Image: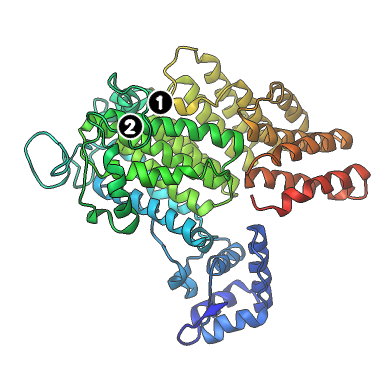
């Protein structure tokens, strides 16, 4: 279905001619890209002719798929305005900004939380943005974070919010709060944060006991105000919210507990499980009103840190379910919030997540840059285990780029950092998943990309030695990697056996990424399609491949 646009779309016609794509060719490419996203599209050359000659604008994901199809042919990103379809984007900028000002950063994040709510209610925002992922959108956030990884002050005073000190206009205080933040020197917030960052140090004070049920009240708690402001957060701009509350450490403790729960759900059930879908809701209902409340610099740092963790988790879950556009926007906001938290290791972790996404999407060089940015800013700040993980992410990108020497060096460094880590190190809670088994699993994927099956088998044996119900998705991914290694070693029986186990695991979780791994394995098995074992595996996988992730 298309909606009318005035006059021919000369821009689209010009770019198609430049790319050398026929009407039939574009229709085929758009249909194929849609199929990869689970969409059934039936465009043909007549459809394309209407877009060009009559200016018809296709609805839903089609405009972005058109841009992606042309971009693939040209070898560069193609923005919608270049092909005369800019009006088709329902939210072209939401979530992509990395504001210098702390108040604008809060607005950018809360705007994204509301957009996600609209998408889930209407069933279409992220689908409409399908294909709009652009690795270049990470350039400004990464560079601004590298220059200034910590804001000078995040104290926020709101009339009626219980703040202390001289009354002034509502908003943030301190140098840089209303303008570009200055560089953080050795004695600034970035250096003072230490391995856990300021948020790690101030996350939960001794006054913050076990988390109370949502809606419980207590001294210094803003939870009682959450219900009152939720409707305003969902309905209009942040500036229209008039009720504010004094935020305390107990509020931050609840957000951190939510993040801990979400990490467990994601690892065990996948990013598409209904439990994981509660993270965006938590951001909108719980975190957003707190960000708009009143707080000291100490509490504010902790609040921004906890919200950054949840926002990164929302991005990771979107990434796991194939919603790359949503993931990118959440990651950008998570990095900005980590800067407000003065938590440099957490900012590095967000950059590592961006790196993994870029590498997964085929932008390995950019993946290397993002991982190295995380490393460089965290020298002397992050724990040994944290530095090991950043090096491991760098290795993944090098391997995907086909640089075996650089990948091997990064893996060696990652292993060295991991050996230096100790049980009593102040590792951040978000790194709890990272162990030697996880190192081996990612090393195996590096060697898979480098087509070294013997090394893959060596590392997957260790990675699969202790299966756990806690990290179900990771176990499924490792089984697929093991199956690919067996296949490349000429062991069809072993490959099918591992593949069968992977399909069984994948059927228990909701993860588009795991499904894509299985699909890739079946593609590699196509030359053996007549073998009974392969036929059986394909049949076992059929329900998984046709079901929505």
Left or right of 404: which side holds 336? left
Residue 549 x %, y % = 64, 49
Pointer 1 residue: 379
CB under 8 Å between callouts 1 and 2? no
Mark 2: give few (<14), some (14-19) or many (20+) Cα within 10 Å. Answer: many
Q: Name the front one of labels 1 and 2.
A: 2
Circle 1 packing at 10 Å, graded few (<14), some (14-19), many (20+), is few
The front one of 261 and 335 is 261
User: Residue at the spot x=79%, y=38% of the render?
Assistant: 499
Return the mark for residue 252.
2
Q: Residue at x 41, y 24 (%)?
A: 382
Q: In the picture, which quadrant includes the N terminus?
A: bottom right
- Place of residue 56 in the rendered image (x, y in percent of width and height, measured from the top left): 53, 81
Q: Is residue 149 visible?
A: no
Dividing the picture into quadrants, the one containing residue 192 is: top left
The kind of secondary structure element at disc 2 is helix
């Amino acid at each position: 279905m298309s909606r009318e646009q005035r006059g021919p779309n000369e821009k689209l016609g010009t770019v198609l001619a430049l790319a050398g794509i026929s009407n039939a060719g574009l229709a085929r490419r758009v249909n194929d890209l849609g199929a990869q996203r689970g969409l059934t599209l039936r465009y043909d050359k007549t459809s394309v002719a209407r877009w060009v000659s009559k200016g018809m604008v296709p609805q839903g994901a089609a405009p972005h798929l058109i841009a992606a199809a042309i971009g693939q042919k040209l070898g560069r990103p193609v923005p919608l305005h270049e092909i005369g379809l800019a009006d088709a984007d329902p939210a072209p900028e939401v979530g992509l900004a990395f504001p210098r000002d702390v108040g604008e950063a809060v607005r950018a994040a809360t705007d994204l939380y509301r957009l996600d709510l609209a998408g889930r209610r209407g069933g279409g925002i992220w689908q409409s943005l399908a294909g709009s992922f652009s690795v270049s959108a990470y350039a400004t956030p990464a560079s601004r974070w590298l220059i200034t990884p910590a804001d000078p002050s995040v104290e926020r005073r709101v009339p009626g919010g219980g703040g202390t000190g001289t009354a002034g206009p509502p908003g943030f205080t301190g140098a840089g709060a209303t303008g570009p933040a200055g560089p953080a020197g050795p004695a600034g917030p970035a250096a003072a944060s230490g391995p856990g960052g300021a948020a790690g140090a101030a996350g939960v004070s001794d006054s913050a006991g076990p988390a109370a049920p949502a809606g419980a009240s207590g001294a210094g708690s803003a939870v009682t105000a959450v219900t009152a402001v939720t409707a305003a957060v969902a309905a209009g701009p942040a500036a229209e919210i008039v009720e504010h509350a004094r935020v305390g450490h107990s509020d931050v403790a609840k957000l951190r507990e939510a993040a801990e729960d979400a990490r467990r759900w994601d690892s065990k059930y996948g990013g598409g499980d209904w439990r994981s879908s509660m993270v965006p809701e938590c951001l909108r209902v719980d975190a957003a009103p707190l960000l708009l409340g009143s707080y000291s610099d100490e509490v504010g740092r902790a609040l921004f840190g906890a919200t950054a963790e949840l926002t990164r988790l929302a991005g990771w879950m979107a990434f796991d379910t194939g919603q790359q556009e949503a993931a990118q926007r959440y990651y950008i906001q998570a990095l900005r919030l980590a800067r407000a938290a003065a938590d440099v290791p957490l900012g590095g972790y967000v950059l590592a997540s961006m790196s993994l996404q870029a590498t997964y999407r085929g932008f390995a060089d950019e993946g290397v840059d993002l991982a190295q940015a995380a490393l460089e800013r965290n020298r002397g700040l992050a724990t040994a285990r944290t530095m090991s993980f950043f090096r491991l992410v760098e290795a993944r990108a090098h391997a995907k780029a086909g640089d075996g020497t650089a990948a091997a060096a990064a893996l060696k460094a990652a292993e060295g950092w991991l050996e230096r880590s100790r049980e009593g190190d102040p590792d951040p809670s978000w790194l709890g998943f990272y162990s030697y088994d996880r190192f081996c699993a990612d090393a195996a994927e590096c060697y898979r990309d480098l087509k070294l099956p013997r090394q893959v088998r060596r590392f997957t044996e260790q990675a699969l030695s202790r299966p756990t119900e806690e990290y179900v998705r990771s176990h499924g991914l490792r089984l697929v990697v093991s199956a690919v290694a067996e296949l490349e070693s000429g062991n069809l029986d072993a490959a099918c056996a591992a593949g069968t186990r992977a399909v069984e695991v994948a059927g228990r979780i909701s993860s588009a990424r795991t499904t894509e791994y299985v699909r890739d394995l079946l593609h590699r098995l196509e030359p053996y399609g007549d073998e009974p074992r392969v036929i059986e595996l394909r049949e076992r996988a059929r329900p998984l491949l046709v079901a929505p992730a």
